[in-house]
Image (cartoon, rainbow, N blue to C red):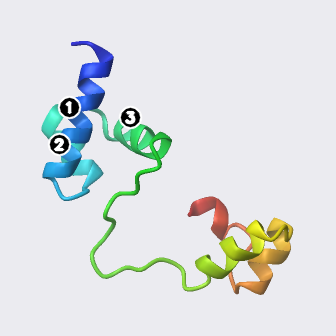
Amino acid sequence: MDFKVLKARFFDALDREDGSITAAARAVGVNRDTAYAWARQAGVRGRGKTGTSGHPGRAEYERLRAAGVRRRDAAARSSASADSPTRW
């Protein structure tokens, strides 16, 4: 199957699966890691685990980074560990 067609089918399935990247990947037969890479490149985030809202300091961290604050300083000021932003 053509790569572009498969990728388009994945994004169609993503809509049908309510944003679940894993479920959409399974529906079209794509490796989950590939599906996450496609979603990341497109700026799409999966729906995530139910009941999780992410790190409480993430918005503050991103605001500080946008204002030009160094990564390490922004992490400290937003109560995140220095490596948390790399995992987000």
- Along the horizontal axis of the image, is 78 left or right of 21? right
Answer yes or no: do the residues labelled 2 and 1 have beta carbons within 8 Å? yes
Residue at the image position 62 percent from the left and 83 percent from the top: 57
- Relative depth, front residue between 42 and 20: 42
What is the spatial separation of the Cα atoms under label 3 and label 2, in whole angstroms? 14 Å
Kindly identify the amino acid type of the residue bearing the numbered disc 1: Arg
Residue 34, labelled with which disc?
3
Residue 13, labelled with which disc?
2
In the displayed structure, 21 sits above or below 37; it is below
Residue at the image position 19 percent from the left and 59 percent from the top: 18
**Residue 56 occupies which quadrant of the picture?**
bottom right
Q: Earlier in the sequence, mark 3 or mark 1?
A: 1
Q: Position of residue 52 (x, y in %)?
A: 37, 79
Q: Position of residue 35 (x, y in %)?
A: 34, 39
Secondary element type, mark 2 = helix
Q: Earlier in the sequence, mark 3 or mark 2?
A: 2
In the displayed structure, 2 sits above or below 9; it is above
Kindly identify the amino acid type of the residue bearing the numbered disc 3: Thr
Q: Which residue is mark 1?
A: 9
